Image (cartoon, rainbow, N blue to C red):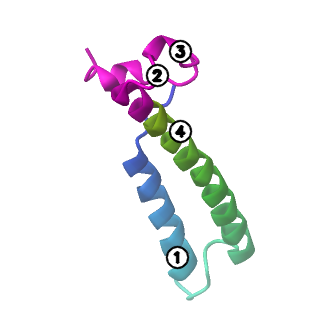
Amino acid sequence: MARNKLSDLNNHLFQVIEDLTNPEVDENGNPKDDYDKTVKKAIAVAKVGQVIVNNAKLQLHAMQLVASGRMVQEELPDTINTKKQLTNGK
């Protein structure tokens, strides 16, 4: 299972921006990668990134509900893993 963090996502997104704005060029000054391919990759990365951000928002909201006492940890679906975060990983 991947151990990536939201900071890794930020790094990937900024790398895509750099690839779009400053494409690598060969010794003749020609772009190394097909720009259309780079744009398609950027769109795909942005879409997946949005899904990751939405998932993080959902987990944060669940943590807020548990922390406020409006919901108990056991009521959350197994797919929302907040127990580790709420107990500081212990």
Q: Nearer the viewer, residue 36 or 25?
A: 36
Question: Disc 3 and disc 1: Cα gap in Å?
Answer: 50 Å
Q: Is mark 2 in CB contact (under 8 Å) with mark 3?
A: yes
At 52% across and 76% down in the image, what residue appears?
A: 24
Residue 38, above or below 79 = below
Question: Disc 3 and disc 4: Cα gap in Å?
Answer: 15 Å
Work out whether mark 3 precedes mark 1 in sequence or the reverse, and give the earlier one: 1
Foreground tag (3 vs 4): 3
Question: Disc 2 and disc 3: Cα gap in Å?
Answer: 7 Å
- Circle 1 — which element? loop
Residue 6 part of the magenta segment: no
Q: Quadrant of residue 90?
A: top left
Work out whether mark 4 precedes mark 1 in sequence or the reverse, and give the earlier one: 1
Residue 75, label in figure: 3
Q: Is mark 3 in CB contact (under 8 Å) with mark 4?
A: no
Q: Nearer the viewer, residue 55 or 30?
A: 55
Residue 82, above or below 28 = above
Residue 14, above or below 63 = below
Foreground tag (1 vs 2): 2
At 64% across and 71% down in the image, what residue appears?
A: 33
Residue 58, label in figure: 4
Under mark 2, the amino acid is Met
Question: Which residue, as the protein is rendered here, is positioned at the far top?
Answer: 74
The residue that disc 1 covers is: 24
